Image (cartoon, grey):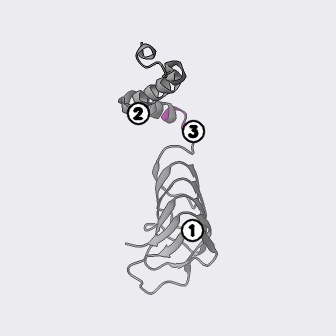
Amino acid sequence: MIEDFIPDMHVKVYLWPILIMALGLKMIFRPHRRFNKRWEKHMYKHRGRFSAFGNEKSSSSEDTINIDLVFSGFRKNIISKDFKGGRIACVFGGGELNLSQADINGVAVLKVEQVFGGVKIIVPANWEVKTDETSAVCGDVSDKRANQTETNPNKILVVKGSVVFGGIDIRNY
C-alpha cells in the first residue's frame, strides 16, 4: 500500500534487508538466559573433549604443569615441593599461576606462549626470577614484586617464551 501513496518507492527492494535487521534486533534485545544455560551445560558435559574452553580453577601438587587454553582463563595453585616448571599456552585468554606455596630445588623453567591475553605469576619472595629469554611484541613482561628481599641462588625460576598483544606479570605477596 505504500507504493500506492508514494509511486517512486519500491518496497520489494527493501523487504529482505528490513526483515534481516528486524531479526537481528530481536536476537540482540531478547533475554539470553535459556541459551547460555544450555551452552554451559553442553560445555560442562564435553569438558574432557574440549579442554580449551571453560575456566580452569584448581590446586595441584604436580611437579610440572601443562596448560593449553583458547578463549578462556585459568587459576591454578601449585603446592608441589619440587616444582620443575612446565608450559602455559593461551590464545585470547589468560589467568593466574600461584606458586607461593610451592618450592623448587635448582632451576625450574616455565615456558609461556601468550597471544591476546595475560598471565599473572605469583612467586615466593626468596625466588630469583629470570625473564631474559622472553620476547614481547606489543606486550609486556614485567616484574612487579613488591618486597625484593635477598633471593636464594638455589631457587631460580626461568620464564621464557613469547607474548603477543598481552602481558606477563610476576608478583609476590
The answer to whether residue 14 shows anywhere in this view is yes
- x then y, percent, for residue 4: 43, 13
Q: In this view, does 128 lie above or below 108?
A: below
Q: What residue would you read off at disc 2?
A: 28
Q: Residues within 10 Å of mark 1 (few under 14, many from 20)?
A: few
- x then y, percent, for residue 88: 58, 59
Start and end of the magenta stretch?
44-50
Foreground residue among 127 and 97: 97
Question: How far apart are the alpha carbons under marks 2 and 3?
Answer: 31 Å
Rendered residue at 36%/32% (across/down): 29
- x then y, percent, for residue 165: 56, 63
Amino acid identity at mark 3: Gly
Rendered residue at 47%/25% (across/down): 18
Question: How far apart are the alpha carbons under marks 2 and 1?
Answer: 33 Å
Q: Is mark 3 on a helix, strand or loop?
A: loop
**Mark 3 or mark 2, which is nearer the start of the sequence?**
2
Foreground residue among 89 and 109: 89
- For the residues bearing labels 2 and 1, Cβ distance under 8 angstroms: no
Q: What residue would you read off at disc 1?
A: 138
Q: What element carries label 2?
A: helix
- The label nearer to you, 2 versus 1, is 2
Foreground residue among 170 and 11: 11
